[in-house]
Image (tube, rainbow, N blue to C red):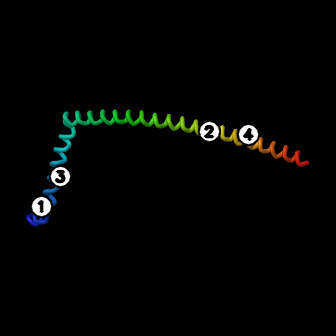
């Protein structure tokens, strides 16, 4: 039996025992009323931050939609102007051809 005790690694056993002790103490600390208050405060802060981020994201999305709508309108107006210019150039070409003939 003494040989079995000699084979036990005292350092590893001590580390294991310390881990069990700290783990048990840690569970007690983490489940205490003070810890629960801290968790509640942190959770409340995270929820407030989430609301702020969501407001900013909504604002950015609305601005992006406005910009997109204005860009589409600009492109439509530009296409109409180019179409008008193309039609007037065709008329000018036809009239200059008719004058030559």
Q: Quadrant of the N terminus?
A: bottom left
How many marks the image carries: the answer is 4
Q: Residue furthest left?
A: 2
Near-viewer residue (86 or 20): 86
Residue drawn 20% across and 42% down? Answer: 27
Left or right: residue 7 versus residue 77 is left
- Residue 56 percent coordinates (x, y): 42, 35
Q: Earlier in the sequence, mark 3 or mark 2?
A: 3
Q: Is residue 59 above or below residue 24?
A: above
> Which residue is rendered at x = 13% and y = 61% of the image?
11
Residue identifier under label 2: 74
Q: Is residue 50 left or right of residue 68?
A: left
**Tag in front: 2 or 1:** 2
Q: CA distance from mark 3 to mark 2?
A: 68 Å
Mark toward the start of the polypeptide (1 vs 3): 1
Per the model, the C-alpha gap separating discs 1 and 3 is 14 Å
User: Distance of mark 3 from mark 4, alpha carbons?
Assistant: 83 Å
Task: Categorize mark 3 by other alpha carbons within 10 Å: few (<14), some (14-19), many (20+).
Answer: few
Residue 48, position as x, y percentages in the image: 34, 33
**Tag 2 near tag 4, CB within 8 Å:** no
Q: Label 3, on which residue?
A: 19
Asked if residue 88 lies left or right of residue 68, the reply is right
Element class at badge 2:
helix
Instruction: Say whether disc 2 or disc 1 marks the residue closer to the N-terminus.
Output: 1
- Quarter of the figure with residue 13: bottom left
| Residue of label 1 | 10
10 Å crowding of disc 2: few (<14), some (14-19), many (20+): few
**Residue drawn where x is 19% and y is 44% of the image:** 26
State whether residue 95 is above or below residue 58. below
User: For numbered disc 1, what is the local secondary structure?
Assistant: helix
Residue in the foreground of this view, choosing between 28 and 82:
82
Residue most extreme to the front: 99
């Amino acid at each position: 039996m003494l040989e079995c005790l000699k084979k036990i690694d005292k350092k590893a056993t001590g580390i294991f025992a310390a881990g069990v002790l700290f783990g048990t103490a840690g569970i007690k600390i983490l489940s205490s009323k003070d810890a629960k208050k801290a968790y509640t405060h942190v959770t409340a802060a995270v929820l407030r931050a989430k609301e702020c981020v969501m407001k900013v994201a909504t604002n950015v999305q609305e601005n992006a939609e406005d910009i997109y709508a204005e860009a589409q309108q600009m492109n439509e107006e530009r296409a109409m102007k180019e179409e008008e210019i193309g039609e007037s150039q065709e008329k000018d070409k036809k009239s200059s051809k008719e004058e030559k003939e």
